[in-house]
Amino acid sequence: MQNAGIAALGLNWRYLAFEVHPDNLRAAIQGAKAMKFVGLNLTVPHKLLAVEMVDALDESARTWGAVNTIRFEARDQDGIWQPLQTFADSIPNEIRAQGFNTDASGITRSLREDLQIDLAGAKVLLLGAGGAGRVAAMKLATEQVSELFLVNRTPAKAEALAVELRQRFPATKVFVSYPPHAVDLVLNATSLGLKPEDGSPLDETQFSLTQASAVYDMIYRPAETPLLRAAKASGCRVANGLGMLLYQGAEALEIWTGRTAPIDTMRAALLKNIYGN
Ligand code: ATR
């Protein structure tokens, strides 16, 4: 996805994957800085650790308490920090790492573009209160959903998340239960559906999919989870988590390049690499 995007922008860059032990994360970031990398993406478990290891945090990383994108920067003639890619030939030696988070905005962009959901005022059933569920819940509340129903295998985790949400976002009504009425969106943020033997994370004796306008599953492999299959059969609009992956990556590329990401090219590369078509 990133290399396709980089090529479409005509940049002589390469996006490479490195496996880094968490004990070596600080050294890896320092090394990338020393080698004047343009930037980095980080995934689990590095996203939380990196918050303490970067030199500056963009508001997105501060808000979500996690860094999935780093941009390396140096001072221009006026002493203002600029992305390394803006320095034509000689990059100064003093470089800083700025941390960003593009995951949360990837969720809402995918919901908007792939499901045509208008989140402000929406009623949402969120399945899962783990790492991904927590960020999704916070982001949905930030977008001013009117009602948020939380369901999790371990109810205490959903309860704890609800307490936090009610404190921070009083405008959103938060319940720890299945909804007693129709909702605009069911969002799966559990890992149930990843494995071939997995069932659906939704208990249909508690909530019927005929009561949902749209269903989003953060899982993108397999392309169609049991939840999405059932949702489709019930006539819901459906989308899987590929859009989240795409949009968080596109925003990272925009952070590094300062240019609009070639979304269609990146989506095509993602589809080809993940599903082979
Ligand atoms: P992630 O970072 O992907 O969110 P996580 O923090 O481990 O990973 O959260 C996984 C989520 O999937 C949790 O909501 C988890 O429920 P618990 O909080 O009860 O553990 C949920 N989950 C995982 N396996 C599940 C299963 N077999 N049935 C129902 N929910 C499951």
Image (cartoon, rainbow, N blue to C red):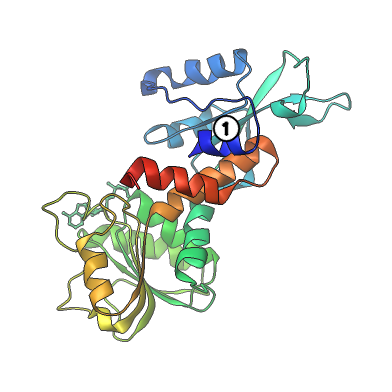
Residue drawn 54% across and 14% down?
A: 31
Is 276 located above or below residue 148 in the figure?
above
State the image coordinates of residue 101 (x, y, percent, origin top left).
Answer: 54, 44
State the image coordinates of residue 17 (x, y, percent, origin top left).
Answer: 43, 25
User: In this figure, which residue is indicated by the disc labeled 1?
Assistant: 70
Mark 1: few/some/many CA within 10 Å (<14, 14-19, 20+)? many
Please give the count of numbered marks on the rendered protein.
Answer: 1
State the image coordinates of residue 272 (x, y, percent, origin top left).
Answer: 38, 44
Judged left or right of residue 260, residue 224 is: left
Furthest residue toward left: 197
State the image coordinates of residue 42 (x, y, percent, origin top left).
Answer: 46, 33
Is 112 located above or below residue 47 in the figure?
below
Determine whether the beta carbon of the residue marked 1 sits less than 8 angstroms from the nearest atom of ligand 1: no
Residue drawn 77% across and 23% down?
A: 87
Is 112 located above or below residue 209 in the figure?
above
**Kind of residue at disc 1:** Ile
Query: In front here: 206 or 214?
Result: 214
